[in-house]
Each structure stands twice: as structure tokens, then as C-alpha cells.
């Protein structure tokens, strides 16, 4: 049973990431006048954000907004290339900076969950393992492990509106600012949509695993 769930989600995430890879490659061929870094600077400025820095970070797909240091970190290729894919990613990360600035509630909830999730990540595998081993003698332990795992599932679901909203802000602004026309706006939107599916698959996989653990715990305690 576990292997079927695992196999289905492994296949799904492979499909999603290869389609994402293809779309980004395709939309990287579509030139724009501004580099990712210039797009980010302009979007922050036009949203009245002056205290967030745009920096270049090594690696591929390492782009992220860091609320603690107030930096939009763009990967090397996004930072210095001038194409639709780079602009979409740069604007998406600035979308997170705008969410932070405007105290967007799902982002605040997500940030509040970070320490909880770090704690869960550190302990859940050990507690779950011990819970499975002592399911007959000490079934409560498995429920503690499930509780810890549930925090990471919750986190994966809270991430979804945050990601979708950042992409919506990105695409709207790219069009409004005249960085993209109707045709290239559509491309930017498509690229960001396929990136969002990664988070959807991750959240569903986490939920399926959680349900699976719960079924085992229920079965174990009935014995
Ligand atoms: Zn994001």
C-alpha cells in the first residue's frame, strides 16, 4: 500500500518537474529588455519597497525571498538573463517581498509555522519509527509522531496560497509595468503555474502519507 502511494507521487512529481524544466527552457528563449535583477529592482521600487536588496545566489532554481534578511535572492541565470522565464521568477520572488510588506495573512501564518516545522522535521522520523516498533505496547507514541508529521502537512498546504498569490502579483505587475505584452504575459503565467504544481504535488503526497499513518495507527490500536 505504502509503495503504491509512494510510486504514484514519485511519478507525479517527476512529470511535474520535467514539464517545469521544459517550460522554463522554452520561455528562456523568449528575450525581454530587462534582466531578472532589473525586473526585481523595478518591481520592488514601484511597489514602494526600498529596504529589500536584490542579490545573486549560486546554483540553479535557488531563487527565494528571505524575510529575515529582507533580500530577494536570485540564482545566477535568473539574475543576469533577460528573458520571460527569468522575469517571471524574479517577479514571483518580489511578490513574496510585497506579501511581507503588506502583512499578507497566509505568509504570516507560514512564517509562524517555520520553527514548529523545524522542530517536527528534527524529531518526527525517530518518533514515528519508535511508534511503529512499539505499536502494540505503547500506541500513544505513534500518535505523537503523527502529530509531528501533521505539522509538516499543514505547512505544505499553507504554502499553496502563498505561492499562488506571489505568482498572481508577479504576472499582474509584469503586464501593468509593460515588461511583458499579452503574448509574453501568458508565457510568464504558464511558467509560474507549472512551478506551483510542484507545491500541489508535495502537499498531496504529504496528506496521503499522513492518512496512511493514521490508518496504521487505527488498525494497530484495534488489535
Ligand atoms: Zn515562491
Image: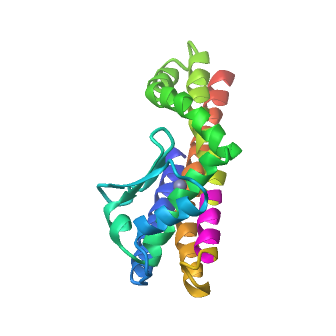
Residue at the farthest left position: 58
Task: Name the foreground residue: 214 vs 125.
Answer: 125
Q: Is residue 79 left or right of residue 138?
A: left
Taking the spot 42% from the left edge, 78% from the top edge, the residue there is: 83
Q: Position of residue 9 (x, y in %)?
A: 52, 56
Nearer to me, 20 or 11: 20
Q: Which residues are magenta?
A: 165-175
Magenta span contains residue 47 = no
Task: List x then y, in percent, for residue 213.
Answer: 59, 35
Main SS, magenta region, reads: helix
Q: Nearer the viewer, residue 99 or 134?
A: 99
Q: Is residue 101 visible?
A: yes
Position of residue 102 in the picture relative to residue 203 (left or right): right
Q: Quadrant of residue 154?
A: top right
- Residue 212 in view in this figure: no
Q: Quadrant of residue 33?
A: bottom left
Q: How is the image coloured?
A: rainbow
Give x and y (percent) for residue 212: 60, 40
Vertical placement of residue 212 versus 115, above or below = below
Kindly identify the residue that appears in the image at 54 percent across and 59 percent down.
44
> What is the total number of numbered labels drawn onto the structure image?
0
Indicate yes or no whether the magenta region holds residue 170: yes
Q: Where the C terminus falls, by quadrant?
A: top right
Q: Which residue extends farthest bottom?
A: 183
Residue at image location 69% in from the left, 23% down from the top: 222
* Residue 193, x across and y down, in percent: 58, 68
- At x 59%, y 65%, the residue is 170
Residue 116 or residue 216, whichever sits in front: 116
Amino acid at each position: 500500500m505504502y509503495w503504491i502511494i509512494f510510486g504514484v507521487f514519485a511519478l507525479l512529481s517527476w512529470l511535474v518537474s520535467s514539464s517545469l524544466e521544459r517550460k522554463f527552457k522554452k520561455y528562456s528563449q523568449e528575450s525581454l529588455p530587462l534582466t531578472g535583477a532589473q525586473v526585481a529592482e523595478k518591481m520592488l521600487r514601484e511597489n514602494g519597497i526600498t529596504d529589500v536588496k536584490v542579490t545573486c545566489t549560486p546554483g540553479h532554481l535557488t531563487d527565494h525571498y528571505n524575510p529575515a534578511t529582507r533580500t530577494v535572492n536570485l540564482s545566477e541565470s535568473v539574475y543576469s538573463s533577460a528573458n520571460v522565464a527569468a522575469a517571471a521568477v524574479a517577479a514571483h520572488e518580489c511578490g513574496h517581498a510585497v506579501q511581507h510588506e503588506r502583512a499578507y495573512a497566509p505568509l504570516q501564518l507560514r512564517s509562524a509555522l517555520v520553527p514548529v516545522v523545524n522542530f517536527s522535521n528534527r524529531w518526527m522520523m525517530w518518533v514515528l519509527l519508535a511508534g511503529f516498533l512499539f505499536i502494540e505496547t505503547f500506541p500513544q507514541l505513534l500518535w505523537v509522531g503523527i502529530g509531528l508529521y501533521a505539522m509538516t502537512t499543514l505547512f505544505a498546504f499553507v504554502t499553496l496560497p502563498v505561492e499562488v498569490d506571489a505568482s498572481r502579483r508577479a504576472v499582474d505587475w509584469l503586464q501593468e509595468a509593460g515588461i511583458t505584452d499579452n503574448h509574453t504575459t501568458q508565457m510568464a503565467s504558464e511558467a509560474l503555474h507549472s512551478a506551483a504544481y510542484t507545491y500541489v504535488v508535495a502537499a498531496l503526497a504529504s496528506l496521503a502519507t499522513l492518512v496512511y499513518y493514521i490508518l496504521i495507527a487505527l488498525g494497530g490500536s484495534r488489535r
